[in-house]
Image (cartoon, rainbow, N blue to C red):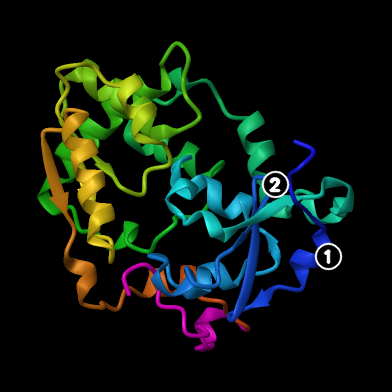
Amino acid sequence: DPHRKLIAYDEVLRHNTKTDCWVIINGEVYDVTKFMEIHPGGVNAILKMAGKDATKAFMPIHPPDALSTLPPEYHVGTLDPTTAPAAAYAETEEEIRIRKAREALPHPEAALNLDEIERSGKTHTLSSATGSDHECKLGSLRSIVSFLKAKIDRIALDQDEPSLKSEVNIVQAAAKEGVAQGLSINASCSLDEIQEAKTSDQTLFFQIYLDRNRKNSENLLRRVEKDGFKGIILTVDSAVPGKRERDMRAKGDFQAPATGGADTNGAKGVAQ
């Protein structure tokens, strides 16, 4: 498009504060200054990417249509690719580790139980997005959950054409096993992708956090109802801040080792 507005990389770099924050996502430049205060993941999650390319941080934890919910005026323009330094897009040590681990990943048939699936997963995935994973206490339900999870995960891995997005694979696997599934509003895939993956009679529930703009939530719920979801899981625990330490450490911008009691720079994680 000859009429699109091209933004130089150096120009983006200058907008790197809480009161003037631009980010790059998939080659597009956004002014998210006003959005930071209402971001579900907290201010610091965005502030750490101020004046930078946030694509790698954004894409794994947001559905592909997430940016469409932003007001049009937040879109500043398109990044001029000729101005972006190669060093800014070089693989990090963690990305190199993950890529090499994935290349060496054994065939899914080699994982025969949940423990082997988990061990395999830990070698080629990023750290948990939130700190709640290890705070859940399964107790007597662990054996049941382990059995179902292993079976669903196994089927998901064995799809003829597995998707890169785990929720799509799990939806297909749950349909085969007749297992009801809850889909998060923060899923890495869109509702359109779920519609393509699910069966017409499949039992799906939709988990939602209410938007401060209630009209947005109303429109989303109407869409979910139209798509045939059987019920709503309304998350209300985040209304009262809880002390989820792993979450705080994951979202914090620490200047020293976390075990030394360093400042989280105001980051409270998604729970707060």
Quarter where residue 159 is shown? top left
Label 2, residues with CA under 10 Å away: few <14, some 14-19, many ≥20 = some
Badge 1 element: helix
Checking the image for residue 48, the label placed there is none
Point out residue 160 in the picture as x, y percentages from the top left corner: 44, 11
Q: Is residue 267 magenta?
A: yes
**Quarter of the image containing the N terminus?**
top right
**Residue at the extreme front of the image, as rendered:** 3
**Residue at the extreme top of the image, as rendered:** 160
Q: CA distance from mark 1 to mark 2?
A: 14 Å
Point out residue 97 in the picture as x, y percentages from the top left corner: 68, 46
User: What residue does disc 1 label?
Assistant: 10
Q: Is residue 164 left or right of residue 22?
A: left
Q: Is residue 146 left or right of residue 144?
A: right
Q: Is residue 212 left or right of residue 193?
A: left
Label 1, residues with CA under 10 Å away: few <14, some 14-19, many ≥20 = few
Checking the image for residue 27, the label placed there is 2
Residue numbers of the magenta segment: 256-272
Residue 62 shows up from this direction: no
